[in-house]
Image (cartoon, grey):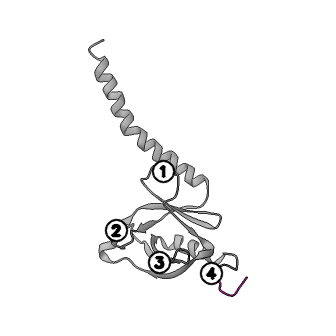
Amino acid sequence: MGEWELPVEIGLVALLVVVAPLVWLFVRRRWLTGKGGLFDCSLANQQGNRWSLGLARYEGNMLQWYPALGVGLRPRLSLDRTRTTYQSRRDPEVSEAIQLFSRDVIVTLRTSTPDASHQLAMTQASLTGLLSWLEAAPPGGDRYPGVD
């Protein structure tokens, strides 16, 4: 075993440990982008006091949310368009603004099954797209009571 063989192996392993996650994040983002309309979108935790940066995309009748720095290929949150309604829009408070991108607005969506609300932060342009997508839902379901 040469005197440089061990340091070179350690250096290659260290490089792999640093580079592999970055390459995976790039490949994952490209894969998500190739499957539909992808946009930056942060998600508030259940208490609403902490935000997670992420990506959202439209997949048929579902809005899927993925953490930005996650390694998984499955969405952490999926909202069915036929069971989701727009509740409100607001500007971030000072304590929230430091956790979000500049010019983000916060929208609250309510799902009927299960009965829950979710706060998402996105740009005004992304919000316009989200509202258009929600309005384009086919009639029926819990979204439009009394319409079959």
- Relative height, residue 124 to residue 7 (above, below): below
Q: Which residue is mark 1?
A: 72
Give the amino acid at mark 1: Gly
Query: Where is the N terminus found, in terms of image quarters?
Result: top left
Q: Which residues are magenta?
A: 143-148
Q: Which residue is mark 4?
A: 143
Q: Which residue is mark 2?
A: 50
Residue 67 is situated, as x and y percent measured from the top left of the image, at: 44, 58
Q: Which residue is mark 3?
A: 108
- Mark 2 crowdedness (10 Å alpha carbons): few <14, some 14-19, many ≥20: some
Q: CB of mark 4 within 8 Å of CB of mark 3?
A: no
Badge 1 or badge 2: first in the primary sequence? 2
Give the amino acid at mark 3: Thr
Badge 2 or badge 4: first in the primary sequence? 2
Badge 4 or badge 3: first in the primary sequence? 3
Q: Residue at the spot x=46%, y=71% of the render?
A: 120
Badge 3 or badge 2: first in the primary sequence? 2
Residue 89 is situated, as x and y percent measured from the top left of the image, at: 46, 81
Q: CA distance from mark 3 to mark 2?
A: 15 Å
Q: CB of mark 1 within 8 Å of CB of mark 3?
A: no
Q: CA distance from mark 1 to mark 3?
A: 25 Å
Query: Where is the C terminus found, in terms of image quarters?
Result: bottom right
- Mark 3 crowdedness (10 Å alpha carbons): few <14, some 14-19, many ≥20: some
